[in-house]
Amino acid sequence: MSTVGAAAGPYPCEPPIALVVEHDPWIRLVMCDVLAQAGFRVASASNGFSAVRLARREPLALVVLDLVLPEQSGLSVLAELKATPATARVPVIVVSGHPQALRDAVTQADAVIAKPFGTDTLRAEVSRSRRRAVKAAAHCDSCHTCAEGDRPVGSRRGS
């Protein structure tokens, strides 16, 4: 049986890694806390370039992404994550206080949350995204139709 994040770290028993990308340090701290409580190891970035660099380096299981970022926009980060094979199937929860930015991201994001938001809203979306990712990983493990490079993060055949 496969679970998302089971192979997300260098050791099988490590929790999956979530990336929080948020320019505001207080909001980033709250998001990191919610994800840690949900069982993730949490990496964080305060700008788009750092986010992309971390996404290339770490096997991610989830991304929570603000759209208004310094240096590289969140929409650009989202497009890059979805265009890169290693991160294309990683669930991305987009967060923004700008309604137009949320509308622009809705087709690529797995979920959208408008700011200001409550921690219960974030917890619920994290839980939903995790369930969808686990379901996708189980589908790939059972049907064997995905090419190895197209598999969701953490899914493995024969596990």
Image (tube, helix red, strand yellow):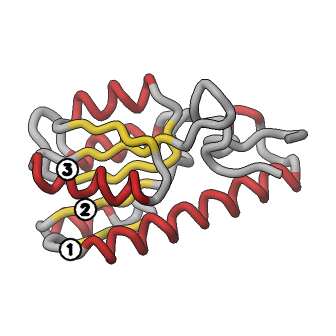
Q: Residue at x 51, y 70 (%)?
A: 128
Work out which quarter of the rendered image holds the C terminus and state it.
top right
Element assignment for label 1: loop
Q: Residue at x 83, y 51 (%)?
A: 1
Q: Earlier in the sequence, mark 1 or mark 2?
A: 2
* Amino acid type indicated by mark 2: Val
Q: Residues within 10 Å of mark 1 (few under 14, many from 20)?
A: few
Residue 42 in percent (x, y) is at: 38, 42
Disc 2 designates what residue? 95
Residue 121 in percent (x, y) is at: 32, 76
Q: Is residue 17 above or below residue 129?
A: above
CB of mark 1 within 8 Å of CB of mark 3? no
Residue 35 placement: quadrant: bottom left
Q: Residues within 10 Å of mark 3 (few under 14, many from 20)?
A: many
Q: Which mark is residue 77?
A: none
Q: Residue at x 22, y 57 (%)?
A: 30
Q: Nearer the viewer, mark 3 or mark 2?
A: 3
Disc 3 designates what residue? 28
Identify which residue, 49 or 54, lies in the foreground.
54
* Amino acid type indicated by mark 3: Arg
Q: Is residue 65 left or right of residue 24?
A: right
Q: Nearer the viewer, mark 1 or mark 2?
A: 1
* Amino acid type indicated by mark 1: Phe
Element assignment for label 2: strand
